[in-house]
Amino acid sequence: MNFYKDHYDVIVVGGALAGLSAALQLADKGKDVLVLERHNLPGGVATSFVRGGIEIEAALHEMMYIGAKDNRQKVGVFFDQLGIDIDWLRVPEAYHASLPGLEVTLHPGMEQFSREVDAAVPGTYEKVKRLMDLCATVYDSVNELSIHPMSKPQMLLKHAAFVKTAGYSTKEVLDTFDLPQKALDLIAPYWIYVGSGFSDLPFTIYAVLMGEYIGNGSYIPRKFSHEMSLKMAEKAEEMGVQIEYRQHVDKILVKDGQACGVRTARGDEISADYVICSAYPNKVYTSMIEPAEAVPAGAIKMVNGRRISLTAFSVILILDKPAEELNIKDYSIFRGTTMDTDKIYDELKGLGPYSYLTCICHNYGNPDATPEGTCSFSITVLPRVDGWKTVTADEYDRVKHQVAKQLIDDMSAYFGVNLLDHVLEIVIETPMTVAHYTGMWNGCIYGYAHTMEDHIVARLQTEEEEKFIGHLEFSGAHQISGDGMGPAVVNGRKAAKNVLDTMAKEAQ
């Protein structure tokens, strides 16, 4: 009996959120799908692990595109429609900003957020509210245009704010509001979720970020991010998807300019009409296509012309006291010595010390995240891959512990509590951890940087030109919707839609 079928409609390479989303959407349309995952579990970074008998969230800080039960957003709608039942918990705040001269906790909701900024920086309400309304308008336009593309005249009539701001950086648009620096500092912290300084970050990206996180709020699964991937995999198999783990795809096979199957590392050649791949195009076009001459020069130029964005370094602590007893008072803390995003971005090219930290205490979003009398606290920086690519094997252990200690010492000083005195378990995740566990190119979790020269609006215009090999689609953080677990689901669904559209077109 053969392990694989003779042929599939679609092979999906990678069983993380993007790949599983693609498989689910295809299976929902009756397609025969095979998912091949190199790890022994689904989910990629959407996973958890156990230390000292305590389950620990590996990556998720907060999930976008979910929405309340009576106001579901696109990812929440997708899960609900497929019957993927996840117990979503709303994150209680947007973030606590800890900056020179500012200690302010802000909450989602455009009105409340604007009032809270005004309370900290009096006289700014009208301008901040106008800015938030602009973000909400652009956000709504992006959501509609992603489903219903329009001609330029139609866009000018229906989506004037989107069109007017599309060619400008976040800094250029924010400058027109003439806000005091302290107010700008308070509305800037989420920039780290997209990873480009404001002078090079398209306002469209910033508007979508604020429109979702501030407009709708964010959510986490009660049973950690692995609840998502496990339930998605379970549902996919119920719908007829074949998922095979510990199956590393070595080659994507191409014939007459079209993908026609894959070869695994153990030598299985599996035939399919289409391939959806979660690996970065950098990896695919340089070493995975067979024959190699099937890769056109334009594909290599494309990956060389795109800038890899941020990777991740995290210290996850399980502490022996409740958060409030350790002076940890917020779910999410953005702490820095400056909110000059361009300066911070430049600093992230090195190995530290890092001056901008993102901290999460999961117990404030999920009281049952750890056993009673303990808490989970993570400290994360999102460096560029440049510096970490220089770390040798001999230096790795020293550098890892040096950076981790800097982060712990910084937050210990902030809380006035030596966190090391209260550690039950400690886990250090580095860019190398990410690269080893997921296979992400250079450990990059953020895909290609959204810049003024290369971002979602521009990529939508060149999408068809960048299909260098027929019947091959990509999913993952490196695709149009960008990084994050919510966008990963969107990217996977987009890849599936492209396959379905091509199938329909070729059937005509």
Image (cartoon, rainbow, N blue to C red):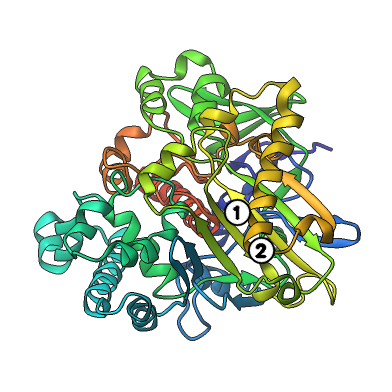
Q: Nearer the viewer, residue 209 or 490?
A: 209
Q: Is residue 212 above or below residue 412?
A: below
Mark 1 secondary-structure assignment: helix
Could you tell me which residue is drawn at 42 percent across and 32 percent down?
470
- Name the residue type under label 1: Leu
- The residue most toward the bottom is 70
Q: Is residue 290 above or below residue 88?
A: above
Sequence order check, earlier mark of 1 and 2? 1
Mark 2 secondary-structure assignment: helix
Q: Is residue 415 above or below residue 406?
A: below
Quadrant of the image containing the N terminus: top right
Q: What residue did someone put label 2 on?
A: 228
Q: Are marks 1 and 2 in contact (CB under 8 Å)?
A: yes
Q: Nearer the viewer, residue 378 or 286?
A: 378
Q: What residue did someone put label 1 on?
A: 17
Residue 337 badge: none
Does residue 328 appear left or right of residue 19 in this picture?
A: right
Q: Position of residue 29 (x, y in %)?
A: 52, 60
Label 2 CA crowd tier, 10 Å (few <14, some 14–19, many 20+): many
Locate residue 121: give its quadrant.
bottom left
Q: Nearer the viewer, residue 53 or 361?
A: 361
Could you tell me which residue is drawn at 12 percent across and 62 percent down?
154
Q: CA distance from mark 1 to mark 2?
A: 8 Å
Q: Position of residue 236 (x, y in %)?
A: 66, 59
Does residue 157 appear left or right of residue 468 in this picture?
A: left
